[in-house]
Amino acid sequence: MYTEGVSVLAILLVAALALLVLNALVAGVLALLFRLTFWRCFRWGLLSLILPPMLLLYGVLIERNCYRVRTVEIASETLPAAFDGYTLVQLSDIHSRSFRYRVRSLERAVDKVNALGADLIVFTGDLVTIGPVELLKTGPALSRLHAPDGVLAILGNHDYCPYMPGARRHANLDSLALVEDRERALGWDLLLNENRKIARGGDTLAVVGVENISTSPAFPSTGDLAGAMAGTEGFWRILLSHDPTHWERDVVGKEDIPLTLSGHTHAAQVSLFGLWTPSSLIYPHNRGLYREQEQYLYVNIGLGETIFPARLCAVPEITRIVLRRR
């Protein structure tokens, strides 16, 4: 073990020395070409070498452990009067694997959610990254989430465990069943193309949960929107659908669903000063609130990570949604 440690250290020192030599050569060339001082070029070159790893270190150690609570109000003329002021908290894309060494950080996120005192908590998919074993670490913390109307959840594309050995047709069925069992063991109500009705003062709204529906053939699509909505005719509906492309294709302008909640994009876990993210190149609706006529979509950028273990100007999100009768 000691020998391996010395070898790794030696490799790092050699790499650092090589970068310094390369920086010195480049600085010398630039100094000659642009008639600048060698040391000025050397310092700027050194900064350009140090800055990227420092940003990455910030994203790994700091930002991915800073949970932002974002409050959004949804105003609707058709919202039942008894639900004016009804509050729900949306969580998405926990990706338990990303918390395997950060359980205390996840516990802080759970405490933040519980402190909001929402009427309902909803989770819009991707509880795991690879497989159900991840929940052995995160399960105790997640089971502490509570709200008067419970925790409603749906599956995301990763919850089908397509990246496990033996996965067929975008899913490892045995692992998927175990994920579902362990999710229910948290005390969460998992909606598999189903709906739940919530009553208040003689009024009712319906929360509709579909399995994953995606426009990309790379992801499983087993959702059944019509089946999930059965029996909710005439009710004000909230749709939980993991992939926002489902809203674009099948919901907006086509179904009587005032509010859809999605996740999936992570905002690519990086954005330019919080204004632009590479995920916008793939997903037209990739973060935040969107509105078309009287239909809303909110895309939560998630708590966990998959692309790399860091976030840069894409702070993990807890969304507090307040319903208002307009």
Image: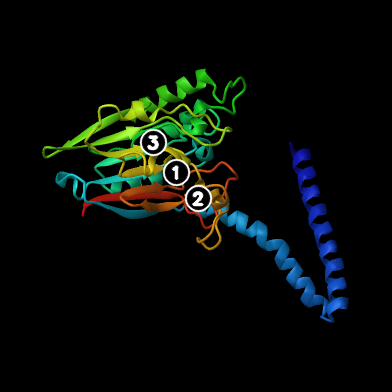
Give the mark nearest the N terminus, 1 or 3. 3
Neighbour class for label 3 at 10 Å: few (<14), some, many (≥20)? many
The residue at 55%/36% (across/down) is 216
Give the mark nearest the N terminus, 2 or 1. 1
Residue 284 disc label:
2
* In the image, residue 235 above or below residue 131: below
Residue 43's spot in the image, x, y percent? Answer: 75, 72
Neighbour class for label 2 at 10 Å: few (<14), some, many (≥20)? few
Q: Amino acid at mark 2?
A: Pro
Q: Check if mark 2's residue and mark 1's residue have beta carbons within 8 Å.
A: yes
Structure colour scheme: rainbow
Which residue is the site of mark 3? Answer: 142
Which residue is the site of mark 1? Answer: 248
Give the mark nearest the N terminus, 3 or 2. 3
The residue at 50%/61% (across/down) is 275
Mark-to-mark CA distance, 2 and 1: 9 Å
Mark-to-mark CA distance, 3 and 2: 31 Å
Task: From the image, state whether disc 3 or disc 2 is nearer to you.
Answer: 2
Q: Amino acid at mark 3?
A: Leu
Residue 128's spot in the image, x, y percent? Answer: 49, 33
Q: What kind of element bears circle 3?
A: helix
